């Protein structure tokens, strides 16, 4: 595993504004699961057909062997992490892994993250953004959870290489998103990047049904998702595409107010972001 770059002091005024803007999202109505889309994609990208067929065969085998989405996706992560922990969390190169982590960190700094905040990261992966949060937050104020034991081992490796052991972060394996082992009202910030993009609606519903209990008064929960303005769909039960109003309504059904984060749309990332909060009493 390639070593992370040496740890540098985090600066709240770091180069957030220097991140190049992306062009507006296009083709938000396309259905990647449709036969027409897949045939057209194959015709345009013949070099990727074999990789897709291999993934199709692997995922069919894993679905047959593992009942339930968590067990299935844990097996997917094991397979992906064996090749590359960075790729397993969605970063095809080390450079992209570092840039995506920096982007997440800078975004929360822009939105007022402070060292005394208590942050829960759902789907912490191998600490792509997590090691920056750990470095910045006061000791003991970072709690990362993930369904994959393999990726948590990679997270421990990242933590040690960055020399952050004295920050006393928590890294915990979970089987669901009920969060029942965590204290009530603990976290001022809950963060889930590229988690719901790999989750069926029942997993998202489970998380939203329970995350409010662990949020501190005035806290917020940010999560990204793959957005569509057409039919909601999934690709191989790995990548899920939702309409904004579906997730907004789901959050509201659990007593949250949901806000679409327009400023996130300006950043070079393909997913969209919602922030949910408890209405002020």
Image: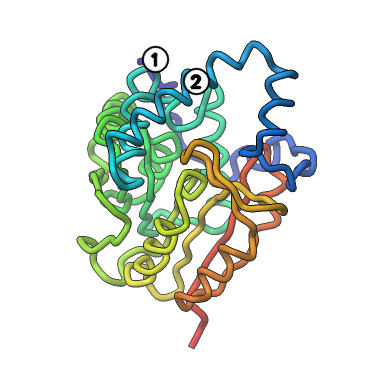
Q: Are the residues flagged by discs 2 and 1 in contact, CB closer than 8 Å? A: yes
Q: Earlier in the sequence, mark 2 or mark 1?
A: 1
Quadrant of the image occupied by residue 96:
top right
Foreground pick, 259 / 238: 238
Would residue 206 appear left or right of 192 to someone viewing this image? left
Residue highlighted by disc 1: 2
Foreground pick, 237 / 125: 237
Q: Residue furthest top?
A: 47
- Judge whether 1 appears above or below 11 on screen: above
Question: Could you classify mark 2 by the number of other residues whose Cα lies within 10 Å: few (under 14), some (14-19), or many (20 or more)?
Answer: some
Q: In which quarter of the image is the N terminus?
A: top left
| Percent of width and height locating residue 180 | 23, 64
In percent of the image, x 32 and y 50: which residue is there? 142
| Percent of width and height locating residue 200 | 46, 52
Mark 2 to mark 1 CA distance (whole Å):
8 Å
| Percent of width and height locating residue 133 | 41, 44
In percent of the image, x 71 and y 52: which residue is there? 230
Quadrant of the image occupied by residue 77:
top left
In percent of the image, x 56 and y 30: which residue is there? 99
In percent of the image, x 35 and y 63: which residue is there? 187
Would residue 104 appear left or right of 15 to someone viewing this image? left
All told, the count of numbered labels is 2
- Kind of element beneath mark 1: loop
Would residue 162 appear left or right of 113 to someone viewing this image? left
| Percent of width and height locating residue 255 | 47, 78
Question: Could you classify mark 1 by the number of other residues whose Cα lies within 10 Å: few (under 14), some (14-19), or many (20 or more)?
Answer: few
Q: Which residue lies furthest to the left in this view?
A: 181
Residue highlighted by disc 2: 94
- Judge whether 210 appears above or below 154 on screen: below
Foreground pick, 208 / 98: 208
């Amino acid at each position: 595993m390639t070593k992370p770059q040496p740890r540098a002091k985090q600066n709240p005024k770091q180069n957030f504004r220097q991140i190049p803007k992306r062009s507006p999202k296009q083709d938000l109505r396309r259905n990647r699961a449709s036969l027409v889309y897949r045939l057209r994609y194959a015709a345009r990208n013949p070099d990727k057909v074999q990789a897709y067929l291999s993934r199709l065969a692997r995922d069919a085998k894993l679905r047959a062997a593992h009942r339930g989405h968590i067990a299935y996706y844990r097996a997917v992560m094991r397979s992906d992490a064996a090749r590359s922990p960075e790729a397993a969390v969605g970063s095809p190169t080390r450079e992209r892994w570092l840039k995506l982590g920096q982007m997440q960190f800078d975004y929360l700094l822009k939105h007022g993250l402070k060292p005394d905040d208590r942050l829960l990261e759902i789907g912490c992966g191998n600490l792509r953004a997590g090691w920056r949060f750990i470095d910045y937050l006061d000791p003991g104020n970072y709690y990362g959870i993930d369904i994959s034991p393999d990726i948590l081992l990679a997270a421990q490796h990242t933590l040690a290489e960055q020399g952050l052991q004295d920050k006393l972060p928590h890294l915990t394996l979970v089987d669901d998103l009920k969060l029942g082992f965590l204290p009530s009202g603990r976290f001022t910030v809950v963060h889930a990047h590229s988690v719901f993009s790999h989750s069926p609606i029942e997993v998202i519903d489970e998380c939203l049904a329970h995350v409010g209990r662990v949020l501190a008064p005035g806290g917020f929960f940010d999560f990204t998702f793959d957005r569509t303005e057409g039919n909601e769909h999934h690709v191989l039960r790995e990548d899920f595409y939702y309409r904004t109003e579906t997730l907004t309504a789901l959050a509201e059904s659990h007593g949250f107010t949901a806000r679409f984060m327009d400023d996130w749309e300006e950043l070079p990332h393909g997913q969209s972001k919602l922030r949910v909060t408890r209405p002020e009493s």
